Amino acid sequence: MEETLEQTGLFGRIREFFVREDVEEMDTDHVPTRTNLKVHAVHRYHVTVRRQVVSFQDAVAAADGLKRGEQQVLNISACPQDLREKIKDFMCGVNYNAEGSWEELGDGVYLLAPASAHVEVAPASQRMVAGRN
C-alpha cells in the first residue's frame, strides 16, 4: 500500500493558521466535525493632529481624545503666551492621569500618547544639535 504526502502551499498554510480542525473519534455513523475559528479585525491606531489650537475648547477636545486612547499632536504656537501655559498645564494633568507620554516636537508642538502606545525618541542628529547652539 502506497501512502502519498500532500504538500501544503502558502495559502493552505495561512488557512491552517486561522482554521482549527477538531476531529472527534470516528464512529461508522458519524462524519468528523470541523470548527472554524473567527479572526477579529484589529482596530487601527488613531492619531489626531491639531494644527492650530487657538482656544481652551480645542485643548479639551484633545484631552477627551487622549482619554479615549487616541494619540494627539498639538500645535499651540499660535496661542497667546498665557493661554499656551494654561493649555500646557491642563494637558500635563490629563496626560499624567492617563499615564501617557509627552514629547516636545518643536517650539509649541507636542506629542501626547496614551499609555498603550510605545513612543521611541531617536537621539538628535548632529545637524539638529548644531542648529540649537
Image (tube, helix red, strand yellow):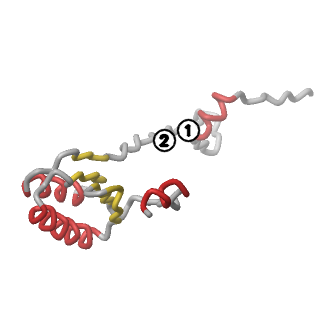
SS at mark 1 in the image: loop
Measured as percent of width and height from the top left, residue 85 is found at 15, 67
Is 47 in front, or is 26? 47
Measured as percent of width and height from the top left, residue 49 is found at 26, 45
Disc sitting over residue 19 in the figure: 1
Q: Which amino acid is tagged 2?
A: Leu
Figure quadrant of residue 40: top left
Q: CA distance from mark 1 to mark 2?
A: 6 Å
Of all residues shown, which one is farthest toward the right? 1
Quarter the N terminus occupies: top right
Q: Which amino acid is tagged 1?
A: Val
Query: Do the residues under discs 1 and 2 have CB atoms within 8 angstroms?
Result: yes
Residue drawn at point x = 82 percent, y = 30 percent? 5
Disc sitting over residue 122 in the figure: none
Q: Is residue 55 left or right of residue 6?
A: left
Q: How many marks?
A: 2
Q: Which residue is mark 2?
A: 37
